Amino acid sequence: MTEVNEKKNKKFKIRKILNPRVKKEDILFIMFLSVLGVLNIANVHYATKTISKVEKLSREVKELQYEYKSLNSEVMFRSKQSEVAKALEPLGLKELKAPPYVVKDSTGKK
């Protein structure tokens, strides 16, 4: 008998919650809350996607900085006078031992 009473009580509570005489304001409020919930979920997904893009770009920038530094040091090394001389030696170009001399115009004009 107690089981029957408990089932009736549950049905009564469910019917009370699902009252067919729900006010229009209540339905509008529930719809408003539903729209806010959907917007919140969309915002969370957008923020997560944006954060992952920012992290990916940050890693890429860090990688490019390392590449820039290594290439810059390589260029600085290869542009040293001794390295340039070594690179031009197979072409038959040699470093001057005497300083260059200035050719002057005999007319005296600049």
Image: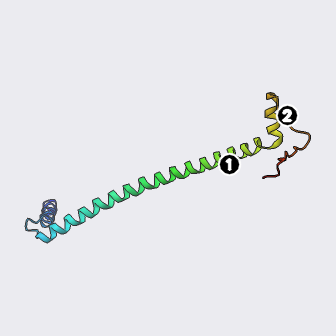
Q: Which residue lies furthest to the left in this view?
A: 21
Point out residue 17 in the picture as x, y percentages from the top left corner. Answer: 15, 66
Amino acid type, label 2? Lys
Quadrant of the image containing the N terminus: bottom left
Identify the residue at the far front of this view. Answer: 107
Q: Which residue is drawn at 41% across and 58% down?
A: 47
Label 1 amino acid? Lys
User: Image check: 64 left or right of 41?
Assistant: right
Closer-to-camera residue (64/83): 83
Sequence-earlier tag: 1 or 2: 1
Q: Name the residue under label 2.
A: 94
Q: Which of 5 and 20 is in front in this view?
A: 20
The residue lying toward the viewer, choosing from 59 and 91, is: 91
- Up-down: is 90 above or below 96? above
In front: mark 1 or mark 2? 2
Residue at left offset 24%, top offset 62%: 35
* Residue at figure coordinates x 13%, y 61% from the top left: 11
Q: Which mark is residue 88?
A: none
Q: Distance between the residues labelled 1 and 2?
A: 31 Å
| Residue pointed to by mark 1 | 69
Judge by depth and name the residue closer to the eye, 52 or 109.
109
